[in-house]
Amino acid sequence: MRRKVVSIVLSAAMMVSMAGALTAFGGETEAASGTESGTEAFTESPEGSGLIKDGVFSIANECGYAPYNWSQPDDSNDSVPIEDTSEYSNGYDVMIAKKICDAYGWKLKVNRLDWDSLIPAVQSGQVDAIIAGQSMTAERAKQVDFAGPYLYATIVVVTKKDSKFASAKGISDLSGGKCTSQMGTIWYDTCLPQIEGADVQEAAESAPAMLMALETGAVDYVCTDMPTAQGAVAAYPDLTILDFSGSDDNFKVSDEDVNIGISVKKGNTALKSEIDAVLNTMDKKDFDDIMADAIKIQPITNN
């Protein structure tokens, strides 16, 4: 996510007035409000409020981008069934979606879609939201509205421990190397072109395909975000993470490139506000702790 993270990051979306939103969506509900103790009080959104249909919060992601989301054959670790399949989904995105559902008493529905199908799905109303490690870019914000961020991402490089690039201290040390990342992501479109002299290969169709290119020696290194990198080294002990944070010789990215958000249909300010009300009860440490839990239980085969 990431990605087009996809997406380890801060430009918080402001909550919109519920009154105007509810007029637009033809229903009534109460906005979350803070109590004297500082905790958030939530009210269940009634059916037909325009937020979600029949109390079911329908989300979509690839179900194949660990540790953000993945597919598995059983319901272990409180996984959620993937619609129209016999498989289940889990991961950071699903864990965040569960917290949103728990706050309002909603039921969660997970749909598996290709990366390029995600935004069209929320635009058409096929799903209520995309929780898939998406960077909150200005270009995407023309197509959808973003709630969040729900993660703050760092852009890193992953290479093999025995690679000549493993000792790189900055992106200038990566010159001459073959590299790739996932298609349609800031990693591929924005970051890799900043490495002078890099031999940029064709973009990989998915995060697992990107990592497989590295594992098989098709490329010397890949560019991704910290959660994806952490999941990768957990799956492949021969890989190492190069984090140039704090160095002047690092990728130049904006907050919109690294803030990870939840997209809803353009103009759906009511649902955006409900999601933001839950996310605003959490901070960076909460997000990082949930991601750490996701990395611990991710199936190795997802990478």
Image: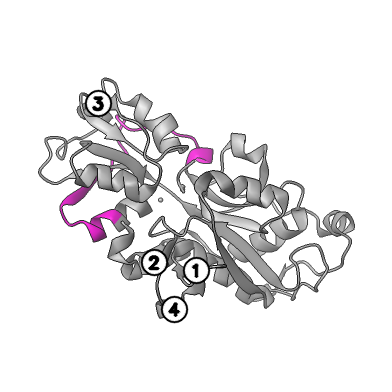
Q: Residue 129, image x and y in percent? A: 64, 57
Task: Read off the residue under disc 2.
Answer: 294
SS under mark 2: helix
Give the residue type at disc 1. Met
Task: Assign a secondary structure to mark 4.
Answer: loop
The amino acid beneath tag 4 is Asp
Upstream in sequence: badge 1 or badge 2: 1
Q: Do labels 3 and 2 touch, CB within 8 Å? A: no
Q: Residue 45: x percent and y percent? A: 77, 72
Q: Residues within 10 Å of mark 2 (few under 14, many from 20)?
A: many
Q: The magenta stretch spans which residues? A: 232-257
Label 3 sits on what residue type? Ser
Residue 256 sits inside the magenta stretch: yes
Can the viewer see residue 264? no
For image coordinates 46% across by 78% down, the residue present is 78
Q: Residues within 10 Å of mark 1 (few under 14, many from 20)?
A: many
Q: Which residue is mark 3?
A: 172
Label 4, label 2: how many angstroms apart (C-alpha)?
Answer: 15 Å
Q: On the picture, is 163 further left or further right than 249?
A: left
